[in-house]
Amino acid sequence: MTLPTSLAVRRFAPGGSPTGPPVLLLHGFASDGHTDWVSTGWPAALTASGRPVLVPDLPGHGSSPAPADATPQAVVKELASAVGDVSEVDVVGYSLGARLAWELPALLPVRRLVLAGISPHEPFGAVDVEAALGFAGGGKLPSDPLTAAIARMITAPGRDPVALAHCIEGLRREPFAPRVGTITVPTRFVAGRDDPISRGIESLVPLVPGSDLLLVPGDHGAALRCFPFRTAALTFLDTP
């Protein structure tokens, strides 16, 4: 049963009977489900192997409205509602999607988890949100490199700067603080070799017993779209 949700969710079904649990794909900040997953062929590859696929737009992203509460706890509850009543689900998250996926096993019967492009620290803690919104309103590009990068992201074509800034504020209210014992399901970490955002990702591996880490070619954007990432994730999800 699918529970009520305000999220825009793309759903893909395999041609025949499902061969495994559905796969939830969670995109990164200032992107959307189509850009990160559909356009790169993930649902097609997963449904070809017999897996149903769910691809939501996170709150304030893509076709999903800006949330009243943008804290990770509230967003994760919304994602759980979108998945609905299932006996098992596999989850692949990238960047912000991976940070949110870290919390999902507490609310959903997650069978396997792929956390890719994830920062071991709170990436939005040092962002000057007002300066980024000032740039969106026609002001100068912020001098701080991180804030400047965020300002460019939230003003990209098709993005809603105010909604995305609201999401940043929500994330800052509940900073990412990974702890041992939060995740107990089989987990694979993936990062681009040249990705500064996921630098230090190896520190997360000891927090998840039995997990592993694979490095793939590329920086933060290229790693998402590289074939080795998809192969590593799908091989892991196909393990009984």
Image: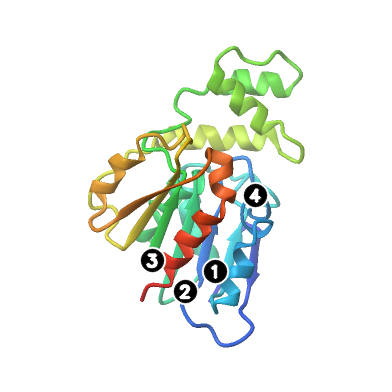
Q: Which residue is mark 1?
A: 3
Sequence-first tag of 3 and 2: 2
At mark 1, the secondary structure is loop
Q: Position of residue 86 (x, y in %)?
A: 45, 75
At mark 3, the secondary structure is strand
Q: CA distance from mark 1 to mark 4?
A: 21 Å
Contact between marks 1 and 2 (CB within 8 A): the answer is: yes
Inspect this view and state whether residue 68 appears. no
Q: Which residue is mark 4?
A: 32
Sequence-first tag of 3 and 1: 1
Tag 3: residue type?
A: Val
Q: CA distance from mark 1 to mark 2?
A: 8 Å
In front of the other: 167 or 112? 112
Tell me which corner region of the image, top left, top right, bottom left or bottom right, holds residue 43.
bottom right
Q: Is residue 215 left or right of residue 79?
A: left
In front of the other: 201 or 144? 201
